[in-house]
Amino acid sequence: MSIALLLRILFAACASTPTRESTGEYVDDAVITTKVKTLLAADDFLKAFQIGVETYRGTVQLSGFVNSQQAVDKAGEIAGGVNGVKSIKNNLIVK
């Protein structure tokens, strides 16, 4: 195999498709998720709640249960302040 052919295969394997992230996008999303989780855990008001965080192509999805609309809003604000976040799906439920 030639080096050019190997490079084509490598780049094709790392490319994104409409349903699959590229390697770079996956790493970026993992960094965003970690930052959001860290900030939520560090917040005195929100650390008592188990808030799920998932990121796909810069869109952060928050899920779980909280005890007030204020907690929903604050979690959304924190997530939105993280560098690289393009949008937020705030699916937190007030119990």
Image: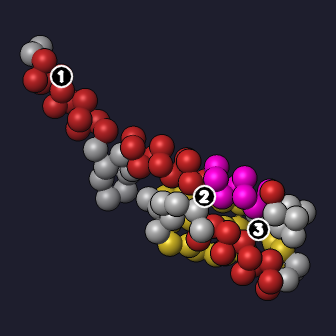
Residue ID for mark 3? 64
* Tags 1 and 3 touching, CB below 8 Å: no
Most distant residue in the bottom direction: 69
Q: Label 1 is placed on what type of residue?
A: Leu
Give whichever of discs 1 and 3 has the lower sequence position. 1
* Tags 2 and 3 touching, CB below 8 Å: no
For marks 2 and 3, give the CA distance.
12 Å
Give the residue at x 31% y 49%: 16
For marks 1 and 3, give the CA distance.
44 Å
Q: Label 3 is placed on what type of residue?
A: Gly
Mark yes or no: residue 77 visible. Answer: yes
Q: Secondary structure at mark 3?
A: strand
Predominant SS along the magenta part: helix
Residue ID for mark 2? 54
Q: Which mark is residue 6?
A: 1
Up the image or down, 78 lies above or below 33; here it is: below
Residue 10, image x, y percentages = 25, 29
Dot 3: few (<14), some (14–19), or many (≥20) neighbours within 10 Å?
some
Magenta segment includes 40: yes
Residue 33, image x, y percentages = 61, 53
Mark yes or no: residue 50 visible. Answer: no
Magenta residue span: 34-41
Residue 22, image x, y percentages = 36, 46
Q: Nearer the viewer, residue 6 or 33?
A: 33
Tell me where residue 76 sits by quadrant: bottom right
Give whichever of discs 1 and 2 has the lower sequence position. 1
Give whichever of discs 2 and 3 has the lower sequence position. 2
Q: Secondary structure at mark 1?
A: helix
